Amino acid sequence: MRMRKWLSTVGVASVLMAGILAGCSKDSSGNKDSEGSKESGKPVEVTLAGWGGNPTEEKLLKQVIEDFESKHKDVKVKYEVISEQYMDVIKTRLIGGEGPDVFYLDAFEAPALIETGVLEPLDEYVTDDFDVEDFEKPLAEAFIQDGKTYGFPKDYSTLALFYNKKMLSDAGVEVPKTFEEFREAAKKLTKDGVYGFGVAPELARMFWLGESTGGDIVKDGKANFASPEVVSALQPIIDMHNVDKTAAEPKEVGANWGGEIFGQGKSAMVIEGNWAIPFLADTFPDIEYGTAELPTVDGKHSTMAYSVAYVMNGASKKKEASWKLISYLTGKEGMETWTSKGYALPTRKSVAEKLGYDKDELRASLVAGASYATVWSEGTNLPIIMNNFNNQFLSAFLGKRPLEEALKEAEKQANSEIDSK
């Protein structure tokens, strides 16, 4: 998941809209797909941009594209990997009228880009056989704004509890089902240089917990994380680090992230996503671990979901061909191929069932969370809210100041920045 700050600038929406108006005109023949046509007999070339992935993922995507082209002889796909500063590059190209026809869009970035008007609404292209109801509802809704659909999610990951089977067995600890049990388990598991919980003290991982008791981290487009409900929900994480001494962030023990602190055996439990499974298989193949849905709070399940969609450039002159590509990539056949190795989870329920992920020993808990997850996407101001939260939450996590005080300052600063936009 790419969580970069949205670089808002005065006039960006109007500049992007001007690019659309300049690029949306049809060619003189009235044909929407001006490059290649039925008359010329040449296939329409559609550009597809993404940020790449590991070699297996790249191979899978190339296979999906080849399958698409074999079934749609009238369309040729030009795939481009943007490996650095992805969103900055995409925005620059959109402003310059040179954006790709189809491209990846992270749910985190979606609200701000949708607001500029550069994306093509997809509702009019959808046919009954596309089966929109098959998508996990929270994931699909992340790309809907004002009743219009601007993208269909290609994959996702939720968060699950990863636990070291041997450590729990040796300590006589059952897999915790509630947050109270989780905290007590962490106490019993913290010994001999091992922490019970390897934690990522950041909003992207804490959002679900902050809202677990009924609070709103974002309210009316503003930061609201200093509310009593949110502070009380997050306080246990601070206490696990500073009072119980049972939690540590990875860098405190020389690791880079949750998968590494867990794989190295320096924490008995972590909260991670699907991406940790292939990492652990490749890097720490001997570790015996299991996964479970996140501990409930007040009897309620919650988790986070991170998703990416395929979207269409509103200025594209090849909209019909672009939709053919999007509908295949996010259709049942294309999605099955793309997610067949388990590097990504399918956003379609039928595909998850067909591939057996809903019953998979390690992935079932991740799939189960998709139906009730909070998607990491909360309006156009989330980047500002996230940055201010992270700065001050970490200071409380490290024991430098009380959590309530830290979050009040962060909320004030975030809303000041929002007001001055």
Image: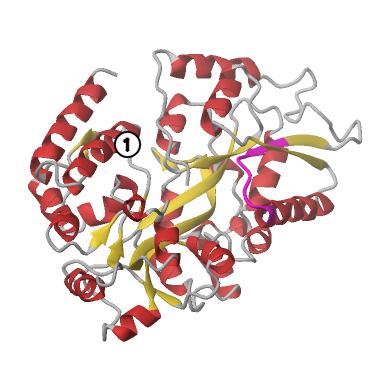
Which of the 4 image quadrants contains residue 245?
bottom left
For residue 18, above or below residue 126? above
Residue at position x 12%, y 45% from top?
403
Instruction: Kindly tell me whether residue 240 is visible in this rendering.
Output: yes
- The residue indicated by pointer 1 is 382
Task: Report how many numbered discs are placed on residues in the image.
Answer: 1
Find residue 55 and report its horizontal and vertical position in percent.
Answer: 69, 53
Q: Nearer the viewer, residue 180 or 331?
A: 180
Which of the 4 image quadrants contains residue 417?
top left
Instruction: Kindly tell me whether residue 214 is visible in this rendering.
Output: no
Q: Amino acid at mark 1?
A: Leu
What range is drawn magenta here? 47-55
Find residue 241 and report its horizontal and vertical position in percent.
Answer: 19, 57
Q: Secondary structure at mark 1?
A: helix
Residue at position x 34%, y 56% from top?
253
Residue count near mark 1 (Cα–Cα under 10 Å), binned few <14, some 14–19, many ≥20: many
For residue 173, above or below residue 267? below
**Left or right: 160, with 322 as reference point:** left
Q: Nearer the viewer, residue 267 or 377?
A: 267
Name of the residue lying farthest toward the front? 192
Q: Nearer the viewer, residue 373 or 313?
A: 373
Which of the 4 image quadrants contains residue 343?
bottom right
Find residue 312 and report its horizontal and vertical position in percent.
Answer: 60, 36
* Magenta span contains residue 148: no
**Left or right: 299, with 128 as reference point:** left
* Magenta span contains residue 52: yes
Q: Quadrant of the C terminus?
A: top left
Residue at position x 66%, y 28% from top?
316
Find residue 397 and report its horizontal and vertical position in percent.
Answer: 20, 48
Residue at position x 48%, y 71% from top?
363
